Image (cartoon, rainbow, N blue to C red):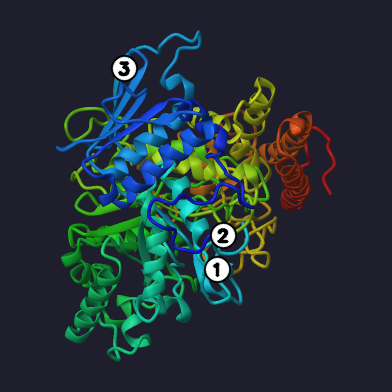
Amino acid sequence: MTGTPLADGQLPPFENDYHPAWLPTAAFAPVGCRRLALAAEDPHDDAVLRTLAAELAEACATHGGAVVAPHDDPDLLLRLATGRLDGYRVVRRHGRVVVTAATPTALLHGWFHVVRTGEAAFSAPDGSPAEDTDERHAPSSDLRMLDHWDNVDVHPVMGQVERGYAGGSIFYDDGVVRADLSRVTAYARLLAAIGIDRVCLNNVNVHAREARLLTADLPDVARLAAALRPYGVRAHLAVSFAAPMTLGGPATSDPLDPDVRAWWRDAADRVWSAVPDFGGFVVKADSEGQLGPFAYGRDHADGANLLAEAVAPHGGLVHWRAFVYDHTQDWRDRSTDRARAAHDHFAPLDGRFAPNVIVQVKHGPLDFQTREAVSPVLAAMPRTRLALELQVTQEYTGQQQHVCYLGPWWSEILRFRPWGEAPGPDGGAPVTVADAASGRGPGGLGGGFAAVSNVGDDRFWTGHPLAQANLYAYGRLTWDPELDATAVLDEWISLTFPACSPRLRAALHAIMDDSWRTYERYTAPLGVGFMVSPLRAHYGPDVDGYEYSKWGTYHFADRDGVGVDRTRATGTGYTGQYPAPWRDVYESLGTCPDELLLFFHHVPYSHVLHSGSTVIQHIYDTHFAGVEEVEAMAARWEEVVDEVPDGVAARVRERLAEQRRSAVEWRDQVNTYFFRKSGVPDARGRTIY
């Protein structure tokens, strides 16, 4: 592997010890065997265009095609054009394809679109020229970012990557930025192929070592940015609100203090001087022990606007996380509800944030649970730019030990209609969560999408080879939230396993399509959440693991029933944070969806669900069914292991064995717990301990 950053126009090494993911060499055969051309005034003047020229040359050198001049009738012409064009345009006439874009990065995305389309971009199944088309492909939002929770130093509790389940960091090793960053460029290539163009380089929990990235270690940040830049990916940093005090500035971090404001302006000037295309700052403040503006009697708008003022001259952004709640809660207090916290803190501040502040909101009000209601904050701040935050890393969904394809869950979230069937602002279709994040909701503002990355230095990027599909799906679904999650998975299969047989394709769909719901079946039921082991960093069952803790994540199971009363009538009032119709849908037992019943209501075990089952029988049935489904997954994998590389076959087999062991433990602990609480036996007479 080469040193870094790679020279301009130099591709990351193709012969390496890490998996090619969705960009194996074979995926480029349909384009690389043809005549390709790049039309730009001087492609050598731009890093991304140099990369694109190298991509074409590599594809042709590998697969027998040729790079020709634009006027030599190429089969594929990539053309950089002037004028306004969001995304890229693909025109096909008589089997020849022209991709046009107004920016180098958009043109690069267009190149990967053709690679993804494969032979169908040029030919019909019978070999004749494909039907003429004229398509425009624009992203739903200009902001599609991944947050890395990587630590420069190995943290004594959280390790090298907080909530990381795929080894160490691809950026840092042994307390410093890696000497060889060619794998970072390979990562940027994977991201460009799915339309992601921003990466935050470090943990939102900014420890003392990571804080220095803002000052003394800026040259290393510049090296990381240079490794990402060839594929149009911009670097962001997570910064500590306490930075002025901890990095040698004023003895306060009061956002209204003139010296603090000057310190941040100087810091921003230094960052953009070192990295001219730097994206901005990500901030976690007044949350889980991180200092914030509350310490000075200020609010989140005061804190965010301090940083916004500093980065505005450079066109920078501030992503201010809305994950703020009381993490020293008294479990005896049934009136305090962690789910209310983000709305309580942020909704009253709507309209007070600077235009370059993006309030980054977790998709649910708690913490990336397998199933929770969509956060009401996403419908409560029409005068604020909001970003939807997802979690690609599988913290509460099996930690990349379990197959759990999250695309269907994200599709549900993206398509959720916070205002029900009410017409949109222009009288058109009802507004979705994706619309609100993209600027097509009330207020017309949007902050895009962010997600916690699931990548580490493991050979398979995500530890579990099939977990790579979640990263792929995040990029594709945030580019176009209307895509079908199953079709996106099929794209991933086609690229990751070129020349995939119908048998292998069917097996992968059988294993992965419904795997999120399978995981849900054998873990926490009916939206109640958590029930995980705090001592094993949220892996494995521990039904009462958080029940008497300070974290505010309770299920309140007793001999009579289970669930959290969040109603206005008798509970915490959380349902009142939603607009109509959801405030009433969730309030009523008669209309609350089964899958969220225990998130909103405390009910007796005998309560009959809309499905016709009682709560207790549903718990028993789903936990037994979940284990059976995992066993079927493992059996299906064994039928096709001969069709995948040995390393992939072995790793997936190992992970499926662990998933079965864990699913059995979940089944037996959860079922036994509720049998002992309720005293109600399983109607089917199965073994419960």
Q: CA distance from mark 3 to mark 1?
A: 61 Å
At label 1, the amino acid type is Trp
> Which residue has dot 3 on it?
133
Please state the horizontal and vertical placement of residue 17, each as a whole percent of the image. 64, 52
Question: Does the rendering let one see residue 576?
Answer: no
Q: Residue at x 67, y 68 (%)?
A: 535
In primary-sequence order, the first of circles 2 and 3 is 3
At label 3, the amino acid type is Thr
The quarter of the displayed image where residue 73 is located: top left
Is 669 situated above or below 141? below
The quarter of the displayed image where residue 526 is located: top right
Residue 554 is marked as 2
> Which residue has dot 1 on it?
331
* Residue density around tag 1, few if under 14, some if 14–19, many if 20 or more, within 10 Å: some
Check whether the beta carbons of the residues at disc 3 and disc 1 lie within 8 A of each other.
Answer: no
* Residue density around tag 2, few if under 14, some if 14–19, many if 20 or more, within 10 Å: many
Please state the horizontal and vertical placement of residue 425, each as a whole percent of the image. 18, 35
Q: Residue at x 22, y 79 (%)?
A: 266
| Quarter of the picture holding the N terminus | bottom right
Secondary-structure class at tag 3: strand
In primary-sequence order, the first of circles 2 and 1 is 1
Secondary-structure class at tag 1: loop
Secondary-structure class at tag 2: loop
Check whether the beta carbons of the residues at disc 2 and disc 1 lie within 8 A of each other.
Answer: yes
Left of 163 or right of it: where is 210? left
Please state the horizontal and vertical placement of residue 440, each as a whole percent of the image. 23, 39
